[in-house]
Image (spheres, helix red, strand yellow):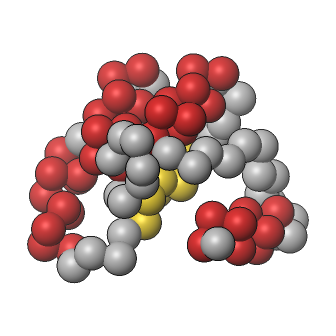
Amino acid sequence: MVRVGLGQFLSEQMDFQVVAEASNGRQALDIVRGGEVDVILLDISMPDQSGVDALAAIKARAPELPVLILSGFPEEHYATTLLRQ
């Protein structure tokens, strides 16, 4: 529900075009492999492959690709690890 809402909000903005959505980390990596994105909006908590693992795989594949991280968890849980990646 959050993904759909964010996608709708972003697609209504003049400077954004939503080109793909993923419901899990593996699908997000598949999107990166397709190479048609300028930025990834990634949730930490996803089924199948966590956002932390997906981020590591995305950065290994496309180190210069900007990634924005969403999380409902307190910052101290993941912030240091994710900023290093």
Check the image and name the residue furthest to the front. 48
Pinpoint residue 55: horizontal percent, then vertical percent. 35, 40
Residue 14 point in image, percent of width and height: 86, 65
Residue pictured at 36% horizontal, 40% vertical: 49
Can you see residue 69? no
Quarter of the image where one finds residue 3 = bottom right
Quarter that holds the C terminus? top left
Residue 60 drawn above or below residue 1: above
Q: Is residue 65 above or below residue 84?
A: above
Residue at left 34%, top 23%?
A: 60
- Residue 69 lies left or right of residue 29; in this view the side is left
Q: Quadrant of residue 19?
A: top right
- Front residue of 48/83: it is 48
As rendered, which of 47 and 29 lies closer to the eye?
47
Left or right: where does residue 45 sit relative to residue 68? left
Q: Residue at x 61, y 45 (%)?
A: 22
**Quarter of the image that includes the N terminus:** bottom right
